[in-house]
Image: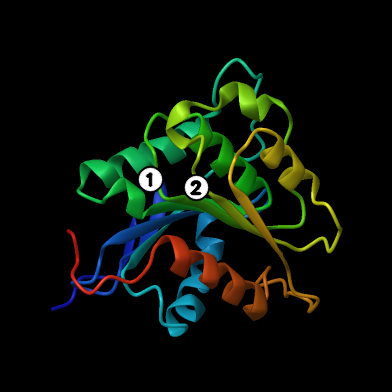
Amino acid sequence: MAPDPLVFTDDYLRVRAVPTCHTSTFVWCHSKGQRGGDWKFMVEPLRKLGHCDHIAFIFPYLDNNETNSGSGISSSEALIQKIVHQEIANGCDPGRIAVGGYNDGLETALKAILADSNKIGSVLGITDCLNLTDELNLLRKTANAKTPVLFVDRTGAKGNCAEKLLKAIDQPVRVVDGSKLASSDTQPVTQEELERLDVFIHQTLPVEMVPKN
């Protein structure tokens, strides 16, 4: 009997990789006003594109209304780091872990990873509102100073401010334009945007024939 593909914990919802295929983990962080489980919808369309059967998706339960005094990381950022550390302890290669999210979730993910001492594969996301400040460089540790940050920009604006800031601190970054099609209340991003995210996933968490764990 196959295990339940969904795993619920106090910290997150996990969608298992296809049985016997797990080599990678993608932690996806929700934005304000959302819940972790709201993003479970993205797994099926991504897997239909043929590049994600080997990936376990984790959707943390974050408190994005929490304010960060700047004296340390927030509880949401600490939770992301905890999940990453658990995945590594359970045998996942750190280079096969991606963390990211949507809007505030992407910002939280980026801060958590840059402040962590465990290097991972990449930071990926979709955003129309990524508010980064110079504080990012102050919290950044050496481990992920060269970790690529790849995201789909939905604003359509030239010269994305977040991209400029990341380039200014020599963080590898690549940005592609989002869809001009409207998203829905139940699916806040479009199929076209998921396809562009899938390109980033395939680049940083490529399919492997033989599972590592």
Q: Which mark is residue 168?
A: none
In this rendering, is residue 204 above or below 86? below
The image quarter in which residue 86 lies = top left
Horizontal and vertical percent position of residue 199 = 53, 71
Display coloring: rainbow
Q: Is residue 91 left or right of residue 84?
A: left
- Indicate left or right for 20 with 138 as reference: left
Extreme residue in the right direction: 157
Q: Which residue is at a point 31% across and 66% down the rendered structure image? A: 16
Residue located farthest toward the top when viewing the structure as drawn: 71
Neighbourhood count class around disc 2 (C-alpha, 10 Å): few under 14, some 14–19, many 20 upward: many
Q: Position of residue 28 (x, y in %)?
A: 50, 55
Task: List x then y, in percent, for residue 174.
Answer: 64, 56
Mark number, residue 61: 2
In this rendering, would 61 be left or right of 126?
left
Residue 39 vertical placement versus 165 (above, below): below
- The secondary structure type at the circle numbered 2 is loop
Residue at image location 20% in from the left, 49% down from the top: 91
What type is the residue that disc 1 sits on? Asp
Check whether the beta carbons of the residues at disc 2 and disc 1 lie within 8 A of each other: yes
Residue found 68% across the figure and 68% down from its top: 188
Residue drawn at (66%, 33%) of the image: 169
Number of numbered discs overlaid on the protein picture: 2
Q: Residues within 10 Å of mark 1 (few under 14, many from 20)?
A: few
- Residues 88 and 205: in front is 205
> Which amino acid type is shown beneath numbered disc 2?
Tyr
Q: Which residue is the site of mark 1?
A: 10
Please, which residue is most extreme toward the left here? 1
Residue 116 shows in this picture: yes
Q: Nearer the viewer, residue 75 or 28?
A: 28
